[in-house]
């Protein structure tokens, strides 16, 4: 699993601390008589089963407000946890810990939710078919959400428009409007990017699949294919040594049947745009801070 650049983590955390006005927490400030300079422990606790992701984000949030914070994780990103399991111990000044609490939890809950949903999809797909994310990410948060997918055992599709050729339905429509064909779109793209760059083409039926493959496509995005339509599409793709990717509003329940059709990949936009956050809490304890 490729780790996330800590500079990206810090930039995202700093932006969310500023958004939350952690520098002007009037609630914590109003209790300064009791809280200022007091040391204590807090525990990050999973309230539901899932996959942890985002520990570096939580640490960055606490450390931004208390450089001397002690953050002792008891699990690692990508680990499965059970409801009630302790994820980390945080020790330090209580005031900055309280100011950073929501930012730390927002990152940890959201990324753990994506990792958890990804892990469930990976399990449903079995060992052969791989789970991919998409570019349907929260604006500005793509690096973090793609990292969460990796923590859940999934793979990342192209990171940006610059990362590969994927001729989609609207590209084909634009070419057809100009008098060309799907095959023209594929052959033109291949001529422009060169043989070292693969060309994936979105198709909606077996006829378009054959046309794309005959024109030189190296991968097919099988969009909204019925299960019984996937098998012949996969078979013809194998003749051309092309990869296959199923997509189009696929649910967890549909994944096993789609995987049995033999596709190489299943892409799920839901991993990053619809994953529910994992319930994680921060509980302040009354004991002494960790050594």
Image (cartoon, grey):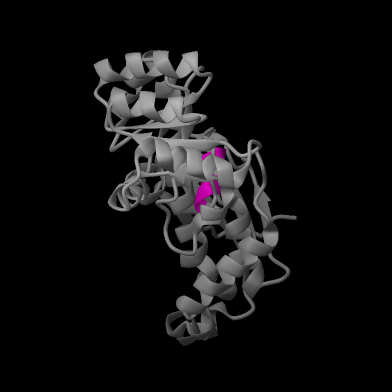
Q: Can the viewer see residue 82?
A: no
Residue 105: x percent and y percent? 48, 58
Magenta stretch secondary structure, dominant:
helix
Which residue is pictured at 57% across the width and 47% down the height?
192
Q: Is residue 103 left or right of residue 231?
A: right
Q: Quadrant of residue 286?
A: bottom right
Q: Which stretch did the figure color magenta?
A: 145-151
Q: Position of residue 11 (x, y in %)?
A: 61, 69
**Residue 60 or 141: which is nearer the viewer?**
141
Residue 202 is covered by the magenta coloring:
no
Residue closer to the observer: 76 or 98: 76
Q: Quadrant of the C terminus?
A: bottom right
Pick the front one: 155 or 286? 155
Nearer the observer, 241 or 131: 241
For residue 9, above or below residue 183: below
Relative side of 159 to 194, left or right? left
| Quadrant location, the N terminus | top right
Q: Is residue 60 above or below residue 164?
A: below
Image mark count: 0
Q: Residue furthest front?
A: 179
Residue at 49% x, 44% y is 188
Residue at image location 36% in from the left, 38% down from the top: 182
Q: Is residue 147 magenta?
A: yes
Task: Tell me residue 154's x, y (percent).
Answer: 51, 34
Can residue 102 be seen from the camera position used here? yes
Residue displayed at 64% across by 47% down: 73
x and y percentages locating residue 121 in the rendered image: 41, 30
């Amino acid at each position: 699993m490729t780790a996330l650049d800590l500079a990206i983590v810090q930039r995202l955390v700093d932006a969310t601390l500023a958004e939350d006005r952690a520098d002007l927490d009037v609630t914590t400030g109003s209790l300064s008589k009791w809280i200022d300079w007091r040391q204590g422990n807090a525990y990050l606790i999973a309230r539901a089963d899932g996959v942890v992701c985002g520990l570096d984000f939580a640490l960055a949030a606490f450390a931004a407000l208390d450089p001397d914070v002690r953050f002792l994780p008891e699990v690692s990103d990508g680990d499965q946890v059970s409801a009630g399991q302790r994820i980390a111990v945080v020790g330090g000044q209580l005031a900055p810990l309280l100011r950073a609490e929501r930012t730390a939890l927002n990152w940890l809950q959201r990324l753990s939710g994506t990792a958890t949903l990804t892990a469930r999809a990976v399990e449903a797909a079995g060992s052969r078919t791989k789970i991919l994310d998409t570019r349907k990410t929260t604006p500005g948060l793509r690096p973090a959400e793609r990292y969460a997918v990796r923590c859940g055992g999934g793979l990342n599709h192209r990171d940006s428009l610059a990362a590969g050729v994927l001729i989609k339905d609207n590209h084909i429509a634009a070419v057809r409007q100009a008098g060309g064909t799907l095959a023209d779109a594929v052959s033109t793209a291949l001529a422009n990017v060169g043989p070292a760059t693969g060309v994936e083409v979105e198709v909606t039926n077996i006829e378009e699949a054959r046309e794309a493959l005959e024109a030189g496509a190296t991968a097919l995005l099988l969009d909204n294919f019925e299960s019984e339509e996937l098998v012949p599409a996969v078979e013809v793709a194998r003749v051309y040594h092309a990869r296959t990717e199923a997509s189009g509003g696929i649910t967890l329940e549909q994944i096993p049947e789609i995987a049995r059709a033999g596709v190489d990949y299943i892409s799920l936009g839901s991993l990053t745009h619809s994953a529910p956050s994992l319930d994680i809490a921060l509980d302040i304890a009354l004991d002494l801070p960790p050594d």
